[in-house]
Image (cartoon, grey):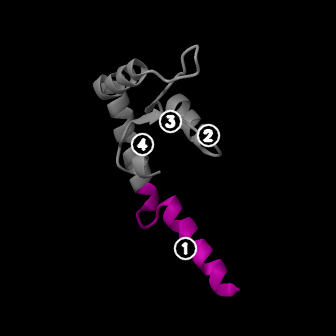
Amino acid sequence: MEGVLHGVPFLCWPYFADQFCNQSYACNVWGTGAKLRRDERGVIAKEEIESKVARLLGDEGVKARAATWKEVARGSIREGGSSHGNLLKLVSLLRQQ
């Protein structure tokens, strides 16, 4: 979420747990990421990393989508935003306990 909040494109190399879901969102839903692919030996080559970084940094579409999602994320944490409201609900529920 920190990357989204700051409008940063993602170079995705998931290892475990929720990282695979995060990769799916960044690459397939938000359009702000690039998935690294292993070669036939199961290794991610430096050329793969280099090409994906170059693509992320050079693609104006990725930059524009990252900026859009940045604004969406910031709006959700502002007063009145959905994340702000959900946090207040959680605090209220915890106070009732």
Specify which label sits upstream in the sequence, 3 or 1: 3
Dot 2 crowding, Cα within 10 Å, few <14, some 14–19, many 20+: few
Q: Which residue is mark 3?
A: 26
Label 3: element kind? helix
Q: Which residue is mark 2?
A: 21
What's the amino acid at mark 2? Cys
Dot 1 crowding, Cα within 10 Å, few <14, some 14–19, many 20+: few
Outermost residue toward the bottom in this view: 96
**Horizontal side, residue 95 vs residue 8: left or right:** right
Q: Is 86 colored magenta in this rendering?
A: yes
Q: Which labelled disc corresponds to residue 57?
A: none
What's the amino acid at mark 3? Ala
Q: CA distance from mark 4 to mark 1?
A: 23 Å
Dot 3 crowding, Cα within 10 Å, few <14, some 14–19, many 20+: many
Q: CA distance from mark 3 to mark 2?
A: 9 Å
**Horizontal side, residue 29 vs residue 63: left or right:** right
Count how many numbered circles sit on residues in the image. 4
Q: Which residue is mark 1?
A: 88
User: Start and end of the magenta stretch?
Assistant: 75-97
**Labels 2 & 1 near each other (Cβ < 8 A):** no
**Labels 2 & 4 near each other (Cβ < 8 A):** no
Q: CA distance from mark 2 to mark 4?
A: 17 Å
Q: Which labelled disc corresponds to residue 69?
A: 4
Dot 4 crowding, Cα within 10 Å, few <14, some 14–19, many 20+: many
Q: Residue at x 54, y 16 (%)?
A: 39
Instruction: Tell me where residue 24 appears, x and y as whole percent.
Output: 58, 34
Q: CA distance from mark 3 to mark 4?
A: 10 Å
Label 4: element kind? helix
Query: Vertical placement of 15 versus 60: above or below?
Result: below
What's the amino acid at mark 1? Leu
Instruction: Tell me where residue 31 appears, x and y as whole percent.
Output: 46, 30
Q: Residue at x 37, y 19 (%)?
A: 51
